[in-house]
């Protein structure tokens, strides 16, 4: 690290100490203040003549940056501009997005980040994070040690095989890790100086990438089987060796690999999978919020989940945990959930059932009396008609799956049907909020995985809550970092879901939303972090001393994007 944050012993205020001078400070995104370097700093740091003479302020820079952002006519153009700004100045980038969070989060993350991953090799400007290829499997500890942060707080790692709903993007998948870590900083105040995005490049099966002369990744089919797992094992061993206190988040792995890695390593280091556990927590939070509108109890809910990937498994399992807290047995809780995949309702007589599907598979005797054209392939609409669920959740990445028939069936058996179309990016959404509201005569409680504009229905403006993992994972990461939590458990995610639901105001409910506004996301993350820490202490995964002034301790740890005075201090 080329700098250190210190406290002035006379004033008690923080400043940035660096042993570098001159152009090096302008080329480093962590130390660069550009025109905001004061006249005194310019003299002391040998910057005179390297900058225009006018001394500016962060506020002036924000006006200029926003003007340039708006000048880009496309979402991808806006993404490229923000990425370039990120490369030039961490503080200015995060402050700009903080000031315009609702407008810019869809650019920094989903849905635009998906297109950026697809176009990664064509819009590449500057390296960020670490690229670890299969050919480098014998040198992973040395590669990790090359990174500037000696004690990173969070690593987000992907192998690029299942980016959002867009499939295999190979090396370009690192874009999702960069975007995710930007949200850790933006939403929870985890210092950007300590975050580390990593892509594990084992090749790609995407023929378009392999045929692209500009593709920056390995040009061969994906390494699979024992060789793949050995590579991942070596990576995790290197992380434990070089960064023993880091939080490792798995991101956008193919379903089988995502489940395997989580199960394989969750008891060996501090780790979680946001696609499984984060998605589950934010979804369950939305379910809790919906109960405030419907007036029903959690144990009264019946759920159909369309899609049977890793996120569906996480949602189903956490819902079962929540239902069991109401006094239901494991079997009773699972009986409240029906799963539908591309082959229809999952039943126990289907050959080759995966473990997750087997847990929620329905007995063929149960559906013997159902009205269905083919009981060996019961459709989503037929499942809704017969199971009469109160909640419909989509993780299928199948646009239009929640068609008019399905939504109207939900509305027939519920005064306030709950419809969560969670697949992203937007092009993969099961239905639009406008359609869900129109087909339910405005009665549906709608949430989506991607951002949607408010919907005007029958003269009423309804804000569409985004079931956005950023309400959960940044706060979990903050809690792990502040609490020095040693392991991450499912119960921590259930408490995170409850903490998010508790952040819902009466205004949110009146606006028709099941999630808070993004402008309050730092308060949400604070609440999630404290809940996670309390659970960690109760489970013995963190020391009880962290509970002393916990609220203040967490708030104080949250980094805010503002320029600090910069001073030259020679290295001892």
Image: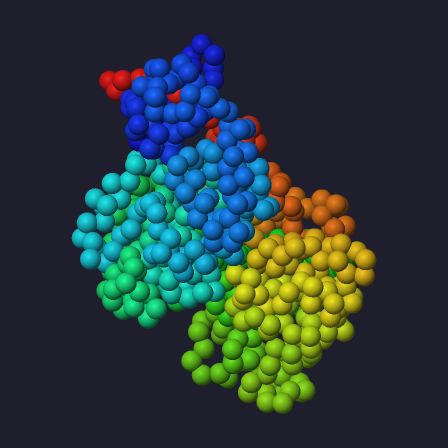
Q: Nearest the camera: 391 or 89?
A: 89
Horizontal arrangement in the rendering, residue 427 relative to residue 50 (left or right): right
**Quarter of the view holding residue 525:** top right
Name the residue located 77 percent from the left edge and 61 percent from the top edge. Answer: 457
**Picture coordinates of residue 1 (x, y %)?**
31, 31
Task: Kindly indicate the quadrant of the structure image that contains residue 549.
Answer: top right
User: How was this image coloured?
Assistant: rainbow
Looking at the figure, which quarter contains the C terminus?
top left
Name which residue lies at 69% across and 72% down.
Answer: 407
Where's residue 85, x and y in %? 43, 40
Q: Is residue 143 left or right of residue 435?
A: left
User: For the point 45% across and 9% down, which residue is it?
Assistant: 10
Q: Residue furthest right?
A: 459
Estimate the x, y position of residue 443 in percent, counting from the top left.
76, 63
Identify which residue, 14 or 38, lies in the foreground.
38
**Is residue 331 rendered to the left or right of residue 56?**
right
Q: Which percent across, then down, holds residue 130?
A: 30, 47
């Amino acid at each position: 690290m080329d700098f250190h944050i210190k406290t002035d012993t006379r004033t008690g205020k923080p400043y940035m100490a660096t042993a570098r001078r001159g152009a090096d400070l302008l080329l480093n995104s962590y130390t660069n203040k550009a025109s905001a370097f004061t006249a005194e700093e310019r003299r002391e740091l040998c910057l005179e003549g390297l900058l225009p003479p006018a001394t500016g302020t962060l506020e002036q820079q924000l006006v200029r940056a926003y003007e340039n952002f708006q000048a880009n006519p496309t979402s991808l153009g806006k993404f490229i501009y923000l990425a370039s700004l990120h490369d030039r100045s961490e503080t200015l980038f995060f402050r700009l997005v903080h000031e315009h969070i609702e407008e810019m989060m869809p650019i920094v993350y989903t849905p635009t980040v998906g297109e950026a991953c697809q176009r990664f090799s064509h819009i590449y400007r500057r390296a960020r994070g670490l690229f670890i290829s299969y050919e480098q499997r014998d040198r992973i500890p040395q590669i990790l040690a090359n990174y500037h942060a000696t004690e990173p707080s969070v690593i987000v790692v992907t192998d690029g095989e299942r980016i959002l709903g867009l499939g295999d993007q190979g090396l370009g998948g690192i874009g999702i890790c960069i975007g995710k870590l930007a949200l850790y900083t933006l939403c929870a105040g985890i210092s950007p100086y300590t975050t580390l995005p990593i892509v594990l490049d084992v090749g790609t099966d995407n023929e378009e990438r392999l045929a692209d002369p500009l593709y920056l990744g390995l040009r061969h089919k994906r390494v699979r089987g024992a060789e793949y797992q050995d590579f991942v094992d070596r990576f995790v061993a290197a992380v434990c060796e070089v960064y023993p206190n880091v939080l490792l988040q798995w991101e956008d792995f193919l379903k089988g690999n995502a489940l395997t890695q989580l199960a394989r390593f969750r008891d060996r280091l501090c780790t979680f999978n946001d696609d499984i556990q984060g998605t589950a927590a934010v979804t369950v939070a939305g379910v809790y919020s919906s109960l405030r509108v419907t007036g029903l109890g959690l144990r009264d809910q019946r759920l159909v989940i369309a899609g049977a990937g890793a996120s569906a498994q996480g949602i189903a399992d956490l819902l079962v945990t929540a239902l069991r807290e109401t006094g239901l047995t494991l079997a009773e809780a699972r009986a409240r959930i029906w799963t539908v995949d591309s082959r229809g309702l999952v039943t126990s007589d289907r050959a080759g059932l995966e473990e997750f599907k087997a847990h929620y598979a329905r007995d063929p005797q149960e559906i013997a009396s159902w009205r269905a054209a083919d009981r060996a392939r019961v459709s989503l609409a037929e499942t809704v008609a017969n199971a009469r669920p109160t909640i419909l959740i989509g993780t299928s990445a199948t646009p239009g799956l929640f068609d008019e028939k399905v939504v109207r069936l939900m509305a027939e058996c519920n005064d306030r049907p709950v419809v969560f179309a969670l697949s992203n990016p937007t092009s993969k959404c099961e239905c639009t909020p406008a359609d869900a509201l129109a087909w339910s005569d405005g009665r549906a409680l709608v949430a989506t995985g991607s951002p949607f504009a408010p919907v005007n229905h029958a003269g009423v403006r309804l804000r569409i809550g985004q079931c956005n993992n950023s309400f959960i994972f940044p706060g979990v990461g903050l809690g792990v970092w502040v609490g020095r939590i040693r392991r991450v458990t499912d119960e921590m995610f259930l408490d995170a879901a409850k903490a998010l639901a508790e952040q819902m105001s009466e205004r949110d409910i009146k606006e028709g939303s099941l999630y808070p506004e993004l402008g309050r996301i730092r308060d949400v993350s604070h609440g999630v972090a404290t809940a996670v820490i309390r659970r960690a202490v109760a489970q013995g995964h963190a020391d009880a001393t962290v509970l002393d002034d916990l609220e203040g301790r967490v708030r104080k740890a949250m980094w805010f994007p503002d320029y600090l005075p910069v001073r030259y201090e020679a290295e001892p």
